[in-house]
Image (cartoon, rainbow, N blue to C red):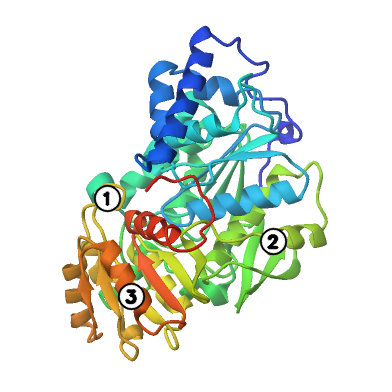
Amino acid sequence: MMRPTASKAQPADQPGRPRRPWRSLLALLVGKAVRIVSRLSHHGGSALPGKVVERIDPGFLARTLSGLPRGVVLVSGTNGKTTTTRMVASMLESLGLKVFTNPTGSNFTRGVVSALVSTLGLSGHLHADIAVLELDEAYAVHFVRQVKPRYALLLNVMRDQLDRFGEIDTTARLLGQVALATTGTVVLNREDPRIASLAAQTPAQTGVAYFGLSDDLLTYFPTDDDMHASDRGAGVGSAGSAPRPVRHGHRLPAEVTLERVMDHRAAFRLDGRILETDLRLEGVYNLYNAAAALALVRVVLEDREPDDAALMDALSKVTPAFGRGEVITYQGAPVELVLVKNPMGFRLALSSFDPAGQDTMIAIRDEYADGRDMSWLWDVDFTSLRDTGVAMVSGTRAYDMALRLAYDQVPTEAIETDLDRALAAFLEVHPGRPKRIYCTYTSMLRLRSALGRITSVDDAGVGA
């Protein structure tokens, strides 16, 4: 792995804190007022205060983040951004750093500004060592035009929201601009050919590190090319313009590799050592995200070199991000929210959870944040639900989802497009039995808000 020698305990990328103009204080005050009103009225989302602040003071974001001693970490990619960002932030905090992050998954630049508004005092000074920020693939480009990240963690490129991005190569090009803007080290997924190829786009002075999989686990985590080659009955690597990396003996060296997956436990290889730890996260896909987070944390803390036990302990304490395997208790029974937004994510979620002994609901909406094009549902194999069936299908695309299930011979007990009514009916089916809801992003927000009206739900700062 290449690393820039200046990456150890570097001073801020933009030394000194720029003088605050008068409108910065005004923007902060107005943003705080908008946040209070929005939360009290349950209108608007977590990004609304940021939108207002950006209008009043366009330089607010860059100025506020400019003085952080360890700079900014930017996390992006199609799958796993929110959970991986949470892992990195949680681990760095456990290992002694004071971290600012955008915890709600509002991953536009205005979402980051909103998170700043809720954190800052009237001095406008951000009391943190480092910022760990999740950014949507497109908005990451807008972000790096204002703030140059010291570190970037780029996870994967999959077909997601094609109505926004078109071909997945467009998404890869967006992430390439992030790699180009990174001043310290870029951490890349060596198993995703489009991500691994971004090493060529990093500046000469920027380091490159990789995370990856053991050969035995490659089939657990298919790339977009793999999935579509498999769908057409072709061999691995024969589909698309980017073949997968050569496997045996010629693979890129990885800072961390995921070696084995178990029930809430994983083994990782670091510098030739195999380390195991229990995890509180749900789903096999989050074990791969953990490898990515470990790689990034090791790069950030290379001047400290935390010992193996401290790293594994920090990872074991990470809890699920809201709506990403989050479990909410209702009348003594668990209700698990599993976010799904593209074929690979849905496939991995279905393969991670045994539907036996659970009631299942699927909630699909097609708002802008979900992506309007739901044709990707036809790339998901739902046959694992045949034996148990689906108790409820809901959302604006409920009938599309029910049709898709019918083609896979999965019985559907009820269809209700209204999410509130659907949730109420679903919760009354087999009271006390565990329940799992696969849901798109806006469905998750609505369901989480509805659950918050009838049971205890952790406050994530997200409007209804």
- Residue type at mark 2 is Lys
Give the label on residue 317, or none: 2
Query: For the point 46% across and 41% down, which residue is it?
Result: 135
- Residue type at mark 3 is Phe
Numbered disc 1: secondary structure:
loop
Compared with 143, 74 (above or below) is: below
Hey, which quadrant is residue 226 in on the image? bottom left
Numbered disc 2: secondary structure:
loop
Give the label on residue 117, or none: none
Which of the two residues, 93 or 275, is positioned nearer the viewer here?
Answer: 93
Label 1 and label 2: CA atoms lie apart by: 37 Å
Relative to 9, is 419 on the left or the right? Answer: left
- Residue type at mark 1 is Glu
Find residue 242 and report its horizontal and vertical position in percent.
Answer: 37, 57
In this rendering, the label closer to the viewer, 1 or 2: 2
Label 3 and label 2: CA atoms lie apart by: 32 Å
Nearer-N-terminus badge (1/2): 1
Which of the two residues, 449 or 110, is positioned nearer the viewer here?
Answer: 449
In this rendering, the label closer to the viewer, 1 or 3: 3
Q: Badge 3 is on which residue?
A: 426
Find residue 147 and report its horizontal and vertical position in percent.
Answer: 52, 27
Nearer-N-terminus badge (3/2): 2
Q: Badge 1 is on which residue?
A: 167
